[in-house]
Image (tube, rainbow, N blue to C red):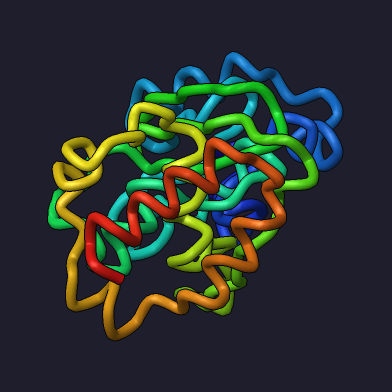
Amino acid sequence: MTFLEFKEQLFDLAYFNIYQVYAWQPDFDRNVLTRWIKKGYLIRLRQGYFTFSEYKRKPDYPLYFANKIYRPSYISLHTALAFYGMIPEMIVQITSVTTLKTAFFNNGIGEYSYHSIKENLMFGYELKPMADNRIIQFATPEKALLDLLYLYPFYNNEQELEELRLDENYLHDDLNKDLLMDYCAKFQSKALDNRVKLLLKTYDL
């Protein structure tokens, strides 16, 4: 089989795993994938998951792959806060939350980190449309902020919260405070309740 035949069959999937290859070609030699990776035709996203090198240059696909290579998960925390313009930093890692164990992947597309939460906290995300009629599971601004305060317990004093440098215009004009409090109640965490109260005080909300 030539690479062009392989690409014609699987390219439109954007990413694929080894089992999809075997379903199409049961006698496929997976060592061929390693050779194609070395030649720069393919990128290994994680063990058993691959994409074509062209997708590295396509917008939105690094975020799309975050949802797909470790499921269930949705983009949240620093990546989501930066996307909404709530924090000023450029974020290198693509940060997500998941009900699986905490994990990290570094590949030819980017760096991916996944933080573990309980199943009952897997809410508060939207399906955002992206290129090629695909969708990305993305935390709302309110849930991204709560995930951060919940998973990073050192945000428990005014100094740490100030160093987050949250955009005050966004907090006052765009953040849905009612939704923030509704979501916060679902966590059933006194520690998070206290951090949210301190956040509201620190940023005069």
Q: Which residue occupies the foreground of this view, 15 or 24?
A: 15
Q: Kindly identify the residue that appears in the image at 33 percent across and 35 percent down.
A: 155
Residue 5 shows up from this direction:
no
Q: Is residue 116 left or right of residue 26?
A: left
Q: Residue 82: x, y in percent?
A: 27, 58
Picture layout, residue 79 above or below residue 179? above
Q: Residue 171: x, y in percent?
A: 29, 72
Q: Is residue 176 left or right of residue 124?
A: left
Q: Kindly identify the residue that appears in the image at 73 percent across and 36 percent down.
A: 118
User: How many numbered marks are there?
Assistant: 0
Q: Residue 41: x, y in percent?
A: 39, 37
In the picture, the quarter occupied by the C terminus is bottom left
Q: Which residue occupies the foreground of this view, 117 or 152?
A: 152
Picture layout, residue 103 above or below residue 171? above
In the picture, the quarter occupied by the N terminus is top right
Picture layout, residue 70 above or below residue 4? above
Picture layout, residue 160 above or below residue 84? above
Q: Kindly identify the residue that appears in the image at 18 percent across and 66 percent down.
A: 167
Give the residue furthest to the bottom: 173
Residue 146 shows up from this direction:
yes
Q: Kindly identify the residue that appears in the image at 60 percent across and 56 percent down.
A: 184
The image quadrant that residue 37 belongs to is top left
The image quadrant that residue 106 belongs to is top left
